[in-house]
Amino acid sequence: MNDTSAGVDPKLLEILVCPVSKEPLRYDAENQELISDKAKLAYPIRDGIPIMLPDEARTLDND
Amino acid sequence: MAETTPNGAKAEIGPFDRVQLRRRRDRAAANFNAHSFLLDEVSLRLTERLDDIKRSFPLAVDLGCHDGRLARHLSGRSGIKRLVQCDISRALVSEAKGPYRVVADEEWLPFAGERLDLIISALSLHWVNDLPGALIQIRRALRPDGLFLAAMLGGDSLTELRQALVRGESELQGGISPRIAPFVEIRDLGALLQRAGFALPVVDSDTITVTYPDALALMRDLRGMGENNILRARQRHFTRRSTLFTAAEHYREMFGDVEGRIPATFQVLYLAGWSPHASQQQALKPGSGEMNLAEALNGET
């Protein structure tokens, strides 16, 4: 999974926020996800393309 | 057609089924090239409009980029250094070339506030349920004095097809069902832009007429564009083939030319608005005049 991490440009990550909370995202390079701590959602990155759709995001557990 | 997403993020309301839209666009992606005439034409016209604005827009977003067609027209123009291409369809975004690609929904913009110099959109916003909400999100993502420029299909689009389908259905099925999207009307758009907080809003339209061998070819082309009907209220069962054939006959009878081809009219609405900035021209506040009107009329000062 790590081999695609080079695909997302940091300049793109700079301007992306969580579409639900509009809060900044945390980039999880290992799992290729953009994490919204506030909305408790993890948006997948597939082939270097962030999928910023609320209904495609993984819901995070509370811990 | 779940009313809530798995995350409970939002109950979908409005006439358009966005999940269905995504599927249709995904499906259209592989062979999009064969059906991109309208988008190509609109992209060209939109680019020319942008050329008329003597400004540079280093950081831009193409909202609803389809297969990256608009980007090809934009490349090297208007001082765009970075163009973020986004679409609700992952398959279409994957077709686009460029370093900055995102799958995003116009109703759920994933962009930080006041960062973008330009948001440009070709033939995508007419599928948005909450247009006022989308416009507010767009305005907030723009830097002060940033530009929003878009083209979308308007209410006078596909009037011929509507009429033909109405005739075909009432003849064969004894009733009609909503079939073509309730497009937005031009007269509403200026007010919507203003309410969303845009300065200097401008709305206008033009008409593009495309001819086809017959109505079935038109419907195939609409499907190829991913623009076929995604009405939530659509019939559950498929339209009977007989209805389509009858509609196609009515279409030819009512609108066909001497060579037997049929025209399809697309009304394209153009929207432009600026994120407010102190340098822009603005109306004076009522009561802020320093000259007495009576004096002015009497020529006395």
Image (spheres, grey):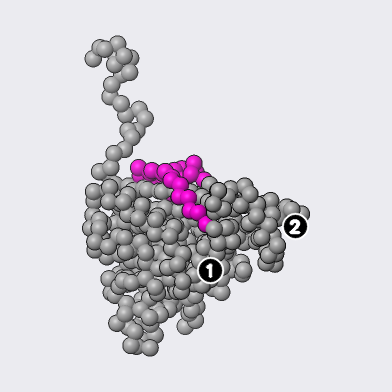
Residue bearing the label numbered 2: B173
User: Which is nearer the eye, A60 or B44?
Assistant: B44
Membership of B209 in magenta stretch? yes
| Mark 2 nearby-residue class (10 Å; few <14, some 14–19, many ≥20) | few
For the point 32% across and 64% down, the residue is B72
Check disc 2 and report its element: helix, strand or loop: loop
Q: Height in image: B24 above or below A28? A: above
x and y, in percent, of residue B276 in the image: 32, 47
The answer to whether residue B108 shows anywhere in this view is no
Work out whether mark 2 precedes mark 1 in sequence or the reverse, and give the earlier one. Answer: 1
Residue B85 in the image: above or below residue B298? below
Q: Nearer the viewer, residue B16 or B112?
A: B16
Q: Residue at x 57, y 58 (%)?
A: B214
Residue B95 percent coordinates (x, y)? 39, 73
Specify the amino acid type for callout 2.
Gln
Looking at this rendering, what residue extends furthest in the front direction?
A: B259
Say whether residue B98 is magenta.
no
Q: Is residue A20 above or below residue B293?
A: below
Q: Secondary structure at mark 1?
A: helix
Residue where numbered disc 1 is placed: B24
The amino acid pointed to by label 1 is: Arg
Above/below status of B256 relative to B289: below
Residue in the picture at 43% in, 60% down: B37
Q: How many marks?
A: 2
Q: Is residue B82 visible?
A: yes
The region drawn magenta spans B185-212
Asked where in the image residue B77 lies, by quadrant, the reply is: bottom left
Dot 1 crowding, Cα within 10 Å, few <14, some 14–19, many 20+: many
Q: Are marks 2 and 1 on the same chain?
A: yes
The subunit carrying tag 2 is B
